[in-house]
């Protein structure tokens, strides 16, 4: 199914829900639950906290969906709600010192490791993933957010523009600066070895 067909299906599911079909909302959740959970996990670094956060996001979406004016913008609207919830939860948890004792080993990897590698390759890949993850986590919030939305969540520039409510050109320039910053940080790490 291509992206246009998927968008049409999403719009139809939204309309079906608005027409009273509660199962249509369940199908919307099934379409987006993994991506929303992974987005939440990238913010809160804990599987249980990410599940709770994703559930809160979908509850808000359920309650707010009748207010959505443009069905064709459902995905951007959903991510806008998700990002706002994630930001708020992140700030709340940070104030409590929640992230002080989080280990990278505690969280599920947002990058998949193939199971058919030998132990040495697997360890090397896991170390690289941990380095990239910790480097992204150390970046400024705006940089981290745009990298996660584009490179982890694989959203389009237009969707990111809608979600963050910034012009398309700004998305591209911020993403370029964030990627450059990430690359420079990784280069510095490898030079320090």
Image (spheres, helix red, strand yellow):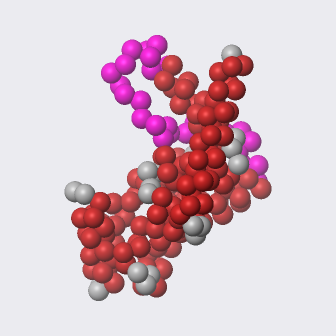
Where, by quadrant of the figure, is residue 99 drawn?
Answer: top right
| Residue sitting nearer the eye, 30 or 131 | 131
The image shows residue 154 at horizontal and vertical percentages of 43, 51
Residue at coordinates 29% horizontally, 86% vertically from top-left?
19
The image shows residue 178 at horizontal and vertical percentages of 62, 46
Residue 190 seen in the current view: yes
Where, by quadrant of the figure, is residue 142 drawn?
Answer: bottom right
| Residue sitting nearer the eye, 145 or 54 | 145
Residue at coordinates 37% horizontally, 78% vertically from top-left?
71
Residue at coordinates 34% horizontally, 72% vertically from top-left?
25
Q: Is residue 118 left or right of residue 7?
A: right
The image shows residue 73 at horizontal and vertical percentages of 41, 73
Residue 31, compared with residue 106, is above or below; it is below
Q: Looking at the rendering, in which quadrant would you find the C terminus? A: top right
The image shows residue 68 at horizontal and vertical percentages of 44, 82
Residue at coordinates 51% horizontally, 53% vertically from top-left?
149
Query: Within the magenta stretch, is there residue 62?
Result: no
| Residue sitting nearer the eye, 46 or 154 | 154
Residue 93, compared with residue 110, is above or below; it is below
Residue 80, compared with residue 41, is above or below; it is below
| Residue sitting nearer the eye, 116 or 93 | 116
Query: Within the magenta stretch, is there residue 120?
Result: yes
The segment highlighted magenta reads 96-123
Where, by quadrant of the figure, is residue 13 drawn?
Answer: bottom left
Q: Is residue 100 left or right of residue 156?
A: right
Q: Looking at the rendering, in which quadrant would you find the N terminus? A: bottom left
């Amino acid at each position: 199914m291509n992206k246009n067909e998927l968008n049409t299906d999403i719009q139809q599911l939204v309309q079906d829900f608005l027409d009273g079909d509660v199962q249509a909302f369940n199908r919307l959740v099934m379409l987006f639950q993994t991506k929303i959970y992974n987005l939440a996990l990238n913010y809160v670094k804990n599987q249980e906290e990410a599940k709770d956060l994703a559930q809160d996001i979908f509850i808000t979406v359920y309650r707010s969906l009748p207010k959505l004016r443009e069905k064709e913008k459902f995905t951007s609207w959903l991510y806008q709600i998700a990002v706002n919830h994630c930001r708020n939860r992140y700030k709340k948890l940070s104030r409590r010192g929640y992230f002080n004792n989080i280990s990278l080993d505690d969280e599920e990897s947002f990058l998949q490791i193939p199971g058919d590698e030998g132990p040495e390759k697997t360890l090397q890949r896991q170390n690289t993933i941990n380095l990239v993850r910790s480097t992204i986590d150390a970046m400024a919030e705006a940089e981290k957010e745009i990298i996660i939305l584009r490179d982890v969540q694989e959203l389009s520039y237009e969707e990111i523009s809608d979600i963050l409510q910034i012009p398309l050109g700004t998305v591209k320039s911020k993403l370029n600066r964030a990627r450059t910053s990430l690359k420079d940080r990784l280069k510095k790490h490898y030079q320090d070895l």
